[in-house]
Amino acid sequence: KFLRSSALTLAVGYISLGLAALALFAAPLWYAWRVTIQEGRNEILQSDAQRLTEVFRREGAPGLVSYIDTRVGMQIAGERMLLLVDAALHPLAGNLPAWPANVPSVPGTYNVQLDLGNGLTDVAVVHAELAGGYHLLVGRDMARFGPLEHRFWYALAGAVAILSVLGTFGGILIRRALMTRIHGIRRTVSAIIQGDLSHRLPTHARGDELNTLSQTINGMLDQIERLIGGIRNVSNSIAHDLRTPLAELRSRLEELALTKPSAEQTFTEIDAAVADVDRVIRIFNALLRLAEIDSGLRRSGFVPVDVAAVAAAAVEFYQPAAELRGSSLSLQIGGPAPIRGDPVLLAQALGNLIDNALKYTPDDSTIVVAVRRNSHAGSVEILVADSGPGIPEEQKSKAIERFYRGDASRCTPGVGLGLSLVDAVARLHGSELLLEDNHPGLRARIVLAQDTPQVTRVARVSSDKESFQHEPVYP
């Protein structure tokens, strides 16, 4: 398994990258070493040749012969090759037995092989031509710096070995760390497959890439658990909330069939039955709309929209209802609040919040609708605050659940889908519905991302069946 693991692949990749970097570092270093040594050696040879040439110029051939013999006697054997020959290439002084045949006749600096008694040796020589047909040869053994070169290669080989060992060891450690995290993920996924949706991937405070992935997957699992929980409860809730209107409808129809009342009373009962059917249809329409929002299909209808204009239209729509109750419904806006979203759904959500505030607050109460634009954070906040009884803290998290109805809403019409729709619309726009205390009353808040810098006009088409409507979905 280790040979097929991604940790091994990663380790081999890092080792290869390290070796390539080491080669790119060593190649110019080796080239600089070779050039520096060669140039330094040639400069020394040129300097020696010039010094000997100066001796020849001052003292002639006998003086140079004496000088070379003295130098040869003082130096270490094999340290430097010196040879002075006449025009016929007969040796006059030096430590070479004869003029090398492979040294070109043209003066200059050359690299040749000479037999120094222990086999052929690479030698750098300087050939200088003196007055009177004399020839001077000064050379040095090129293998003099061989030990340093060997040490360089040994050091390079050691670096390669250390890099390979550390890379392999690091790959093993990386694999162990990855397998530990993967085993945790595997245990969590196995528990979820077996039906325990409460398990979550372990996360750490250091915030590495796997931790970010775990947090993302945990968010997905939270959403899946929420959706599955909603699916588990929706059938019971639908059965419970549809039972009453269906039972009333059956009772009316059965009474009509048994009593056969007058025509006027019959039509009255038929109207009541139609109202029960309409209530059932509205419940199904609300569920279908929530399902459509949850699926994200409504994102295709996102257009530039001014939230301030949507709020102004909603307040204008509900103003007569507020005046009939003697309540104060006011609007606070600070100019255009452009975002990119669905104007129909935003109007529906805002209408549900205002309708809730009117429904659950006493007469002569105060309701404030505010739209605030936060240019620094790039967001738009929608706020609906009232001075009513509010929602107890322990019920706020349940208030947005579908078909949930608190104690204060038992005697009011509705099925408990209004706040669920508002929360679904908020989530479709990348936000969520926040229920907070207003001291006294309730404050519903939605913060929307501000994606569109300019807005031309809010889409409001009265002829469209799904146009700009404020009718609540039975909150």
Image (cartoon, rainbow, N blue to C red):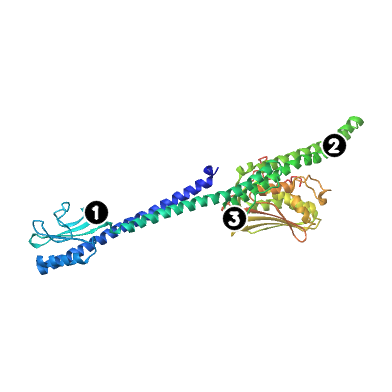
Amino acid type shown at disc 1: Asn
Residue at figure coordinates x 11%, y 68% from the top left? 63
Q: Which residue is mark 3?
A: 207
Q: Secondary structure at mark 2?
A: helix
Q: Secondary structure at mark 3?
A: loop
Q: Foreground mark, 2 or 1? A: 1
Give coordinates of residue 238: x percent, y percent: 78, 40
Q: Foreground mark, 3 or 2? A: 3
Q: Alpha-carbon neighbours of circle 2 within 10 Å: few (<14), some, or many (≥20)?
A: few
Q: Earlier in the sequence, mark 2 or mark 1?
A: 1
**Residue 435 left/right relative to 27:** right
Q: Nearer the viewer, residue 292 or 110?
A: 110
Amino acid type shown at disc 3: Gly
Q: Foreground mark, 1 or 3? A: 1
Disc 3/disc 2 C-alpha distance (Å)? 56 Å
Q: Which residue is mark 2?
A: 247
